């Protein structure tokens, strides 16, 4: 028995006038997702517990079966783990975004957050900027590590308390003054952000980007601190060998922490133009050649399009997941003769209207090849989830529900 978990990050959304009142999920041409909904069990799941921030670390921990209220220690340590950083107990990991701030001669506090991703800066360019940051701001227990695109990491030994941070994707277009660290203990972070602007805004790479009509990656932005994480191994929890296929260090870090095999796919960027084919091949190889029982496929693109307010690109991202990963993978599984089950869902909503994550249940489908049964739905979307009749309020129970349905016939034999 093989298991496929297909995560379209941030796919869930709101009805949009430009889509004739449909959500991006409902409007997208996605025959394979629709087929799973038509022949599977549809429902809603709360992936983020009440009172917790709707972030991808919290939601994906829950989907993998780990109660975020017990195991969440912040997203940054998970990203650090994926990057191969061996954290010590006295170290804190902090997400360091390369962001684009306005550059009109105003004081730092009066600048506006133009883009949390610096126009989705390529990883190679970002690495050059982070090297300059490390040379200027590193040392004294602080080390900067380059990640993927705009997502980077600061490891800070004996870090002062840092609790008054703001997620940069929550303040797009806003003046940053009210969202800067204000507490006395947080002063080192504000100082580093200001110094980073002076360093990066005039960096030759950023001057070239501006000449090309691209936004400068002209400031660091710190958020999401956390200490060294620990999770019970997925294989011991569920008795399954699992593989994670993702472009983002956060998701790969959860996999590493849970003892899963983690695949690095060349050209996987976390953007609309990621390597869909590479993710397909990695997932198929894991299931059909390399002995994995479960593959966890995560695609960031819909979430990034939601943050950027790009409605039609979000629809296109959903369609590409369907056409270039899900459909071909289902065909290969059917051709293999293996029985298999699929869990399809977003980790959280990222509505284009608000350009950030929201706290709402998301639609899921559980499908098993050998137990197809018409559901009465022809489209996979938020409405099929609402009307599906299954509601899972504790998101960390979804994995057990999924695996239990996959094992039903095996238990009866």
Image (cartoon, rainbow, N blue to C red):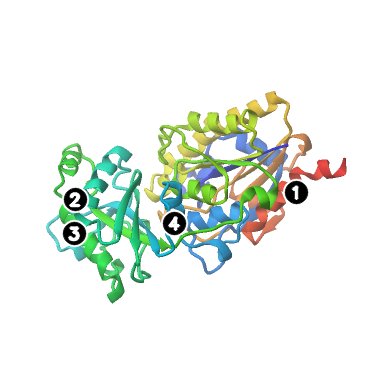
- Earlier in the chain: of badge 3 and badge 4, it is 4
- Earlier in the chain: of badge 2 and badge 4, it is 4
Q: Nearer the viewer, mark 2 or mark 4?
A: 4
Q: Is residue 388 visible?
A: no
Q: Nearer the viewer, mark 3 or mark 4?
A: 4
Q: CA distance from mark 4 to mark 1?
A: 31 Å
Residue occupied by mark 2: 200
Q: Position of residue 273 (x, y in %)?
A: 40, 34
- Earlier in the chain: of badge 4 and badge 1, it is 4
Quadrant housing residue 160: bottom left
Residue occupied by mark 1: 404
Residue visible at 30% across and 42% down in the picture = 121
Residue occupied by mark 4: 77
Disc 1, SS: helix
Q: Position of residue 83 (x, y in %)?
A: 41, 46
Disc 3, SS: helix
| Furthest-bottom residue in this view | 184
């Amino acid at each position: 028995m093989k298991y496929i978990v297909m995560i379209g990050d941030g796919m869930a959304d709101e009805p949009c006038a430009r889509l004739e009142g449909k959500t991006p999920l409902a409007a997208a041409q996605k025959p394979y997702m629709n087929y799973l909904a038509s022949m599977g069990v549809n429902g809603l799941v709360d992936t983020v517990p009440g009172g917790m921030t709707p972030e991808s670390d919290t939601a994906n921990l829950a989907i993998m079966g780990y109660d975020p209220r017990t195991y969440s220690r912040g997203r940054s340590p998970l990203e650090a783990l994926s990057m191969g950083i061996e954290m010590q107990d006295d170290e804190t990991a902090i997400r360091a975004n390369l962001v684009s701030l306005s550059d009109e001669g105003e004081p730092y506090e009066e600048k506006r957050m133009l883009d949390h991703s610096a126009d989705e800066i390529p990883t190679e360019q970002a690495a050059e900027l982070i090297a300059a940051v490390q040379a200027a701001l590193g040392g004294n227990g602080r080390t900067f590590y380059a990640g993927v695109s705009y997502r980077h990491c600061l490891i800070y030994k004996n870090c002062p308390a840092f609790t008054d941070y703001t997620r940069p994707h929550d303040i797009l277009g806003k003046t940053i003054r009210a969202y800067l660290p204000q507490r006395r203990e947080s002063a080192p972070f504000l100082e580093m952000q200001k110094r980073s602007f002076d360093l990066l805004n005039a960096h030759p790479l950023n001057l070239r980007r501006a000449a090309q009509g691209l936004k400068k990656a002209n400031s660091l932005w710190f958020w999401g601190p956390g200490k060294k994480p620990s999770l019970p191994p997925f294989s011991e929890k569920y008795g399954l060998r699992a593989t994670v296929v993702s472009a983002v260090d956060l998701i790969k870090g959860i996999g590493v922490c849970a003892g899963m095999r983690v695949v690095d796919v060349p050209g996987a960027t976390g953007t609309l133009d990621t390597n869909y084919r590479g993710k397909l091949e990695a997932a198929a190889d894991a299931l059909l050649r390399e002995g994995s029982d479960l593959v966890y496929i995560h695609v960031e693109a819909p979430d990034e399009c939601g943050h950027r307010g790009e409605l039609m690109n979000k629809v296109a991202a959903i369609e590409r997941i369907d056409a270039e990963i899900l459909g071909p993978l289902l065909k290969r599984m059917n051709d293999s003769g293996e029985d298999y089950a699929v869990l399809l869902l977003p980790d959280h909503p990222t509505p284009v209207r608000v350009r950030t994550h929201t706290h709402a249940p998301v639609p899921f489908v559980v499908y098993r090849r050998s137990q197809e049964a018409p559901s009465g739905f022809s489209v996979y979307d938020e409405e099929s989830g609402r009307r599906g009749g299954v509601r899972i309020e504790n998101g960390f129970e979804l994995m057990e529900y999924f695996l239990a349905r996959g094992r039903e016939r095996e238990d009866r034999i």
